[in-house]
Amino acid sequence: MKNCIFCGSDGKLSNEHIFPAWLQAHLGIEKEKLEIAFYSEDPQTVRSLVYGSHLNGHVCQNCNNGWMSQLELAASPLLKEMLEGRVSRILTDDEIHSLGLWIFKTALTLHNANPYPQVIPEHHYHLAFERKAPAHCWISIAHLKDPLVQPAWIQDQNWLGAQLHFSGDELREKLKQTYRIIFGFGYFAARIIYFPLNLRLFPLEEGVQFIHPRYRNTPILWPPSRSVEDLWDLNSGMRILPPFSQLSIPSEELTDYE
Ligand SMILES: [Zn+2]
């Protein structure tokens, strides 16, 4: 018998909705067809099913009815406001905390239930159970210019600039240690990045707000002053800094400034 992906117990497993039941009911999509495009180095996979039967059967009843259900309760009022574009204010610390955990939990559940290679380390699920995020993990939110009619997501392990540092098998191995998951519904988009490589990631994008880790408690305004065009904007906006190269300026030029 399989153990719960989150708490590791061998308690009775339940069927957890990947896109939570409250969200499906709110969007009226329980019976709609879900088309998921998985984007990765592997060929793209598209899987069609009905939202209401898109379930993750690897979560135990205690988790599903306990901390996960509490997290849904804590995050759903804000998420409903956000997906409809109704909120216009600075989010509270409590809201940001619940939102960050909810995004992490949802990304893990989505990932686990789908045919994409299982790239997320097992201990990330255990950390979520302890209401923690792993080190080297960034969680962001963005406001979409045009609302998504149906929830959608993208998963990727490629990074702009990676080829400047690695090649061949080493490149493939390094990329496999990372992940990036993006999903959205309505006006709301979220992204989680796990990047444990010893290289610096640099955001090229505008309108994407980092909610974890927080930088000096920067206020998180919703909606942000800029919207992003679509989910793909969140997939291509981070790049790895190029390796530092020695600047060679002829000494004559330097002396000109004296
Ligand atoms: Zn459990």
Image (tube, rainbow, N blue to C red):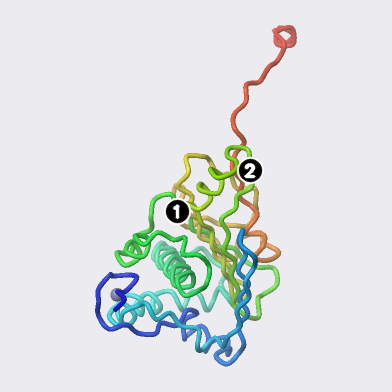
| Label 1: which secondary element | strand
**x, y percentage for residue 177?**
47, 51
**x, y percentage for residue 241?**
60, 39
| Label 2: which secondary element | loop
Residue 94 horizontal side relative to residue 24, left or right: left
Looking at the figure, which quarter contains the N terminus?
bottom left
- Nearer the observer, disc 2 or disc 1? 2
Where is mark 2, residue-wise? Answer: 161
Relative height, residue 224 to residue 171 (above, below): below
Disc 2 crowd, CA 10 A, few/some/many (<14, 14-19, 20+): some
Report if the beta carbon of the residue with label 2 is closer than 8 angstroms to ligand 1: no
Q: Who comes first in sequence, dot 2 or dot 1? A: 1
Disc 1 crowd, CA 10 A, few/some/many (<14, 14-19, 20+): some
Residue 207 horizontal side relative to residue 120, left or right: right
Looking at the figure, which quarter contains the C terminus?
top right
The CA span between labels 2 and 1 is: 19 Å
Name the foreground residue: 152 vs 46. Answer: 46
Q: Residue at x 55, y 61 (%)?
A: 221
Q: Residue at x 54, y 58 (%)?
A: 180
Ligand 1 positioned in quadrant: bottom left
Q: Residue at x 74, y 11 (%)?
A: 253
**x, y percentage for residue 230?**
68, 66
**Disc 2 marks which amino acid?**
Gly
Name the foreground residue: 139 vs 38. Answer: 38
Report the residue that reaches farthest toward the bottom.
31
**x, y percentage for residue 126?**
32, 64
**Disc 1 marks which amino acid?**
Cys
Relative height, residue 224 to residue 258 (above, below): below
Where is mark 1, residue-wise? Answer: 137
Q: Which mark is residue 96?
A: none
Q: Are marks 2 and 1 in contact (CB under 8 Å)?
A: no
Q: Residue at x 31, y 74 (%)?
A: 4
